Structure formats: structure tokens, C-alpha cells
Image (cartoon, rainbow, N blue to C red):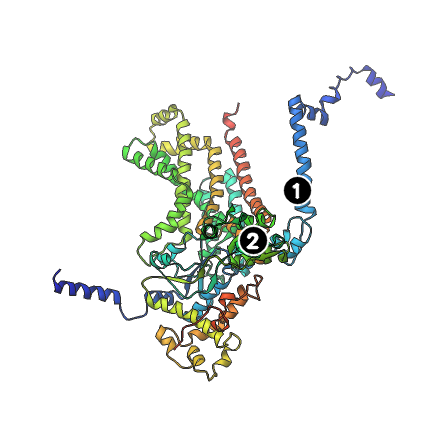
Amino acid sequence: MADLAESRLAPSEPLKPPASSTGVIGWLRANLFSSVWNSILTLIALYFLAVTVPKAVDWLLVDATWQAANGRECMAAAGGACWAAIGEKWRFILFGRFPYEEHWRPLIVCVVFVALFLASCDRRLWGMPLLAIWAAGLALNALLMWGGVFGMTYVDTSLWNGLPLTLILAVIGMAGAFPLAIVLALGRRSHMPAVRAVCVAYIELIRGVPLVTLLFMATVMLPLFLPPGITIDKLLRAQVAIILFAAAYLAEVIRGGLQSIPRGQYEAADALGLGYWQKTRLIILPQALTVVIPALVNTFIGTFKDTALVIIIGLFDLLMLANAAMTDPNWRGFATEAYLFVAAIYWAFCWFMSKYSQWLEADLNKGRRR
Amino acid sequence: MRPRTVFAAAAVTAAFLAGPAFAGPTLDKVKGQGMIVCGVSTGLAGFSLADSQGKFTGLDVDYCRALAAAVLGDANKVKFAPLSAQQRFTALQSGEVDLLSRNTTWTLQRDTQLGLNFAPTMYYDGQGFMVPKKLGVKSAKELNGATVCVQPGTTTELNLADFFRANKMQFKPVVIEKLDEVESAFFSGRCDAYTTDASGLAATRVSKAPNPDDYVILPEIISKEPLAPAVRHGDDEWFDIVKWTVYALIEAEEKGVTSKNVDEMLKSDDPNVKRLLGVTPGMGKSLGLDEKWAYNAIKQVGNYGEIFDRNVGKNSPLKLERGLNDLWTRGGLQYAMPIR
């Protein structure tokens, strides 16, 4: 009774908006059917999804074959995907020709790389601690890959295949390219004509040729110029080509950042009596690099995927191994499954980089948000 | 030039050409590093292909292993360098690999301009056609007006055009880069015929055809593709070793020496077998190798027939016929020069 009395005394509740503009229906109206044109588009999209999604799910899961002794059995079974082929080949696609019994070594290497990425995401570690962590991580990885001590067999670089190879090429490529790119970007804006000319020439030359050309030069031309008997490791040659290539692109990105810094910042630094390097390190670069984070990450993602081009010089990276795995006469004809498997791995890494850059951008721009 | 100068120049040239009378630099290098660096294909079923455990297998690969057994006494002392088609010759010329055992066709230009020396042919291949049985075609000469699936960029495409032009026939090429896609296109009925090397056709038929019996490989072979190991010019001693190791494997099959019975064969009375296995010494020394060179290769890898059957023949998924690759005594082309 008391409730009733109270409710009579209380001011009447504000009227709720009509049911058609809130909740699921409201959302649908606002986002999918807000106009005739949008309604048509929505219906077309729905039709498209209705046609493709069930078939894709059937192929991926319902009709898929999970267990089979060889490719023929898979083909004879229902018409879905043959995940048995991936079950048979996944270790080969990930680690390639690395000694089979010691696959735990490249596995740890991949885990260490991921851990290093995660550690780099924590801004509290930025600076010397992070450098130390990276040095330790890379040393550990080198030890694991080469082996030759602590009962691990020595493994030649020609057997470094698959995911570890892709990660090594990409990570060392970016890490090596970044300092070089900063030097090139600063050099291109230098007041000294000779320095500027060299940097401009380098950047324009490298940007003017495709990565494939550089890789070809490194593997096909370079050995002919070297004195007989001297051969440089194939992996090293490809790695250097990737570093040189990525540096030219990164340099242009960083130059964009440098140009976005207002003149007043330079003048203020000069007024404080800072020298060139102090000014650059303390005032200019931190701001310039923050501005270009999206473009930097874009280049990083590009470099990560570009490493797949080493396929043309016979290095067994992730994609090459997927190709090689599906040449096995016992497991022919499952290229789609293998490519999906590899695509999922590439996507996971690229998505992570992209998400992190969005977060970092927001975090670093707190001071400028309005 | 005056006669004396000519003589002096000739003497100097001769001294360089003849070279010092010790084992070739490649053999020294191989012994020094304790392994042979062998250029192989990045992935070709039956010839060189990494299995699910990442181990290279195949005919080309087994030849490298036999050579390592002959030279170093251990078939595992090989480092395989997978090479793309474009890099293979540079890799050999620059000394990155000690030999090329990479599904390479022996041609005049490669032998001369590219500075290669080809060892005896390990596999006689040739380009052929596969058609669906329901087409009712019995000969490639009946393919006038056919749509033909072919991969671009190799001699395959050129041979195809040559064959049709020579026979005054028309064809429509369907050119697809990736092996998997070109095969799928053929089996889904986009083409009347599919052309590539006969070994490749057989591999495709057994491993990819929805029902292998629905497809036939036509009898015409329209090109010669002798696939042979190669070394670079300028090291004749090494060339001899590579050449005679092939012959030793073929000779072993001809004399019935296999990896299983090689130890019993050491007691054989056949002088040929005695010379081959080093019971009668002299052959190994002539090559600059251990007298057990052929014994090691046969014991650890097998004779030519065993290598063939294991990788591409009746014991492999490819199930290729011996055909041209049978011994000369059985109507094939494999003929070892006398080891004596």
C-alpha cells in the first residue's frame, strides 16, 4: 500500500521514447534502414551473406574432413575442407626443414618474439630496460636457432624455415631499418649539401626499384662480383636487402613527421642553447615520431608481409612452405586449406600490430585531445 | 708476334690450362668442409621434396646423397640448397653450390654459354599430353582445335606451340601460372588437354585426378628433356667424380648389386663387380677417392633402380614406368660406360 501511495505522490515518470526508436529495432532503423537506398543496400548485403555464409560454414566445418590417412581419402570424403592435410603438415608449414626432433627450439623462438612484442607494448619499459630485454631476447633466439651448445645440435641457417624465418626477417628488418631511416630522414633535411645529396640519392634509388629486384640483386648478381670461394649466407643477403628497402620507406615517413613540427619548436630549442643532437633527440624526434605512428605501423605491416617475397630466392618462409607442403603427392590439391592456415597466422600478427598502434596513438595524443 | 713470344705465350697458357696435377679445388673444398653443398629444387614431387618431417627426398636428392657417400663415405654429409629456377645457374657459377641436381634439362646453350658440364642423365623426361578418356582421343595428332592447359614461362609453352605448328593444327592455350590452379582447371573441364613433362602428368594423374582411370596420357612425347646433374666448367677432376658416380649407380643395377646384397657381392667372382666395389683396387684411386667409393654409395643409397623405384617408380606414389630410364639391356637408355 505504501508503495502505491508513494507512487501517486511522485512526479510522473518521463515518457519513454517510442519502442521503435530504442533497443534492437531502433538500432536497426538507425543503422540499416534509415533510408530507401540504405534499406536496399542492407537487403542486398543480407542476401549475399545468406548465400555465402552457410556454404562457407559447411565447407569450413560441417563437411570438413578432420582425419584421413592421405589426400585421396580426403577427396573421397565429403566435399568440405581437408583439415587432415593441415594436421599432417602444420609442423612442416611452421618450421620446415628444422630438425624434426628439435622443433621445440623454433617454437620457443616464436614465443620469445611474441613476448618481446608484448613487452614493447608496455610504455613503462621504454628506454634502456626495453633495449636490454630485446638484446637478451635476440641473443636467446640466436642461441636457440644456431644451437651447437648445451646438447643442442648445430643448425645451419639454410634450415631456418617457416614462421621463425618470417619473424626474423621482419623483426630484424624493422629493427635494422628504423635507426637507418632516422639518419636518412635527418640527412635529407640537413643543411649540408653533400649529406643531403647522398640521402636523397639513396632514398630515391631504393624507392625506385621493387623489393623483388633488390632480392634478386642480392642473390643472383652479388655472388658474381665477389671473389671466388667467398659466399655470404643467403639469409644474411636477403636480410640486408630487406633492411635497406624498409629504411628508404621509413625515412620518408619520418621526414613527414619532421616537417610537421612547427618552426617555433626548433627556435625554442635553439633559444635554450641546445646543440643539434640534443635538440633532435629531446625536442624534435619525440614529437615527430608520435605524429607518424599510423604511417610507421603501416610500413611495419607492409614489411612484415613483404618478407614473403623471399619465396623467389628459394628461402623457405611461411608461404613457401605452404606451397612446398602441398606438392607432396600424398597430399595434393589442398592449397586453399594451406593458404587459409598461413593467412590466419599473417592476419593475427598484422591485426595485433594495427590494434596496438591505435591504442598507442590514442595514449600518446592524450595531451592534444580536445 | 715473333715466334719466340708466341712460344712463351703458349707455354704460359698451357701451364694455366693444364693446372697443377693434384685433386681439383672442388674436391679439396668438399673434403675441407666435410660436406657437399647440393643445389636442389624447392619442391618437385619425386625429384626433390621435403616430406612432413622436413627431410628432403627424391631422385635428385638421392643422387646428392650417393655422391656424398662416394666422396665422403657418409650419405648424410650433404647440405641441400633449395634453389629457384632463376637462381640455380648463378648459384653454381658463383660456387655457392658444388653441384646442381635440380631437374635441369641438358641443352647445348647451358652446356656452353652458361659454363656448365652435365653428368650423365639421371632421368629421361619429355613433354606429353593428358586428356579425359571420354574425349576418345588416341593420339596427340587428333588434338586439332583443342583447348590446352599449360603453365607459362618454361620451355613447355614453347614446345606446345612448336608441336601444333609443325603438325599444322590449331589450339587455344589456357595459360595458368600456379601448378595447383592449372591442374584444377583441367580436372574441372576447362581444357580438353593438359600438357607438361610426362613425369609431371603421371604425378598429377595419380594424386589429383578425381578418378585416375578417367584420364589417359597420350603416347606422343613432343620434346626431349634429359634431366642431368651439372657442375661448373674448370674443374675436370670434380666433373669426373660426379659423372662416374652416376655410372656406378647404373652399373650396380646392371650387375645386380643392391644396397641389400652389396656385402655378399664383395665375394663375387665377376671382375666387373670386383672393380666396381673396390675389391680389385684402382678405380677409386683414379678418381682421387677411397676405393670403397661405389660400395659406400650403393650400400647407403642403393643402385639406380632402387633409387628410381623408391622415388618415382613402383614403390612411390607416382608409379612411373621405367620406359626410357630402363637399362639398355631391357630396352631403355641407361647405359654405364665401362668401369675399368
Secondary structure under tag 1 reads helix
Query: Is A331 or B161 nearer to us in this picture?
Result: B161
- Percent coordinates x, y for residue B65 in the rendering: 46, 66
Please give the chain letter of the residue carrying mark 2. Answer: A
Instruction: Name the residue tied to disc 1.
Output: A56
Mark 1 is on which residue type?
Ala
User: Which quadrant of the structure image shows residue A346?
Assistant: top right
Secondary structure under tag 2 reads loop
Q: CA distance from mark 1 to mark 2?
A: 22 Å
A238 vs A325, left or right, is left
Q: Residue furthest front?
A: B168
Q: Quadrant location of the N terminus of chain A?
A: top right
Do we see residue A39 in this rendering? yes
Q: Is residue A272 above or below residue A311?
A: above
Q: Tell me the number on the disc at residue A326.
A: 2
B27 vs B16, left or right, is right
- Percent coordinates x, y for residue A134 in the rendering: 47, 46
Q: Is residue A148 above or below residue B185?
A: below
Q: Is residue A67 above or below residue B283?
A: above
Q: Residue furthest right?
A: A1
